[in-house]
Image (cartoon, rainbow, N blue to C red):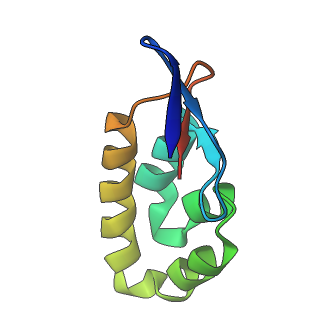
Amino acid sequence: MYAKANPKEVVFKETGSQRPVNKIAYALLAIFLGGLGVHKFYAGKTGKGILYLVLCWTFIPALIGFIEGCVALGKKTDSEGNIMV
């Protein structure tokens, strides 16, 4: 998932299913607009974003989005403030 360049800096390597996104932007989108799947579209996961959008009337995606936003705030960032999603 990530390799450490030096003890104080985290460097992420992009994998097939994950990519780096800005931590603050992702967390805010997930907390406030997570019910519509906006954070998933921002992270490049269009399929999951559409699923959130289709199920938005159940309020389940809103709850999951809030939880994902809180989890994102707890993740470690690289030197540019990005996290892997």
Q: Is residue 2 above or below residue 47?
A: above
Relative to 6, is 12 on the left or the right?
Answer: right
Relative to 39, is 32 on the left or the right?
Answer: left
The residue under the point 33% across, 78% down is 60
- Residue 9 at what x, y percent from top left? 50, 16
* Frontmost residue, 76 versus 37: 76
Q: Is residue 30 above or below residue 35?
A: above
The residue under the point 47% across, 62% down is 34
- Residue 76 at what x, y percent from top left? 40, 30
Image quadrant where residue 79 sits? top right
Say how many tags the image has.
Answer: 0
- Residue 84 at what x, y percent from top left? 53, 46
- Residue 25 at what x, y percent from top left? 57, 39
* Frontmost residue, 15 versus 70: 15
* Frontmost residue, 21 versus 5: 5
The residue under the point 69% across, 62% down is 44
The residue under the point 58% across, 64% down is 40
Image quadrant where residue 49 sits? bottom right
Image quadrant where residue 78 sits? top right
